[in-house]
Amino acid sequence: MTTTLVLTRKPDAVFQSSLFKTQFGRFGTLLVLQGPPVTKVEISEGNGDSDTISVPTGNLAVSTTDGTGVEEIGRYTTIERMHGYIQLKPQHHNGKVYKEEPYGLRYEPHNRVVAELKSSGGRCFRVLGGLTEKERAILIHEAPHVGFLVGCIGPRMLNDCDTGFTSSSHAAMNELFRVTPRPSALFVLDW
């Protein structure tokens, strides 16, 4: 069994920080799937059936190495920094292929940059396989507000759309750190 994360950024909900008027972010949804290794994830429109996994713009079509299904075990709201900050490319979007395989993930228990946020203890997931140097620096970590992100992804509890400070990011990351096996792959579905 493996754990795979899936990030969708649709619908495109950009916000202005209520703490710092020059900082902007975008909300998204992060799903946590468990089952066999995932080889491909796409969004299909329509209602689907009872076995489909719904996302804000349709349903996930998930392909696995052995053809069996996956189970959704968690879902979070995410924030990413906007207006000039790097973001991971989707595997494919609007007919263009950016990356054939998923991004890898590696747990880092003592990241010195993340440790500047004392409550995090320096724990994060490093995204592996970025196509550029800046993409290879992207982390998934605790982010109480969008100012804590410089290209990284900050999960928080589902439906927490606070544009200022929130403590739910700490709780969301602690849940993700407890998932076993740890997440090892990330699919990005859209811009």
Image: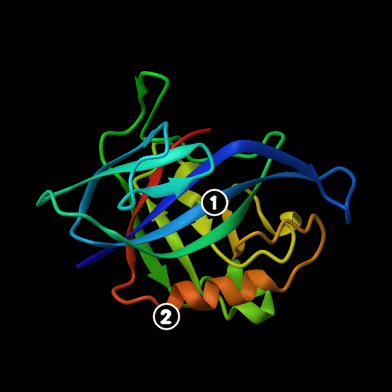
The x, y position of residue 27, in whole percent, is: 65, 47
Amino acid type, callout 2: Arg
State which quarter of the image contains the N terminus.
bottom left
Looking at the image, tell me whether mark 2 or mark 1 is earlier in sequence order.
1
On the rendered structure, is 68 left or right of 170?
left
Q: Tell me, for residue 178, which label it has, or none.
A: 2
Labels 2, 1: front one: 1
Give whichever of 55, 141 is nearer the camera. Answer: 55
Give whichever of 128, 156 is nearer the camera. Answer: 156
Q: Tell me, for residue 29, which label it has, or none.
A: 1
The x, y position of residue 78, in whole percent, is: 60, 54
- Dot 2 falls on a residue whose secondary structure is helix
- Dot 1 falls on a residue whose secondary structure is strand
Give whichever of 87, 170 is nearer the camera. Answer: 170
Q: Is residue 17 above or below residue 174?
A: above
Determine the residue positioned at 58% across, 47% down: 28
Q: Is residue 18 above or below residue 182?
A: above
- Give the alpha-carbon distance from disc 2 to disc 1, as whole Å: 19 Å
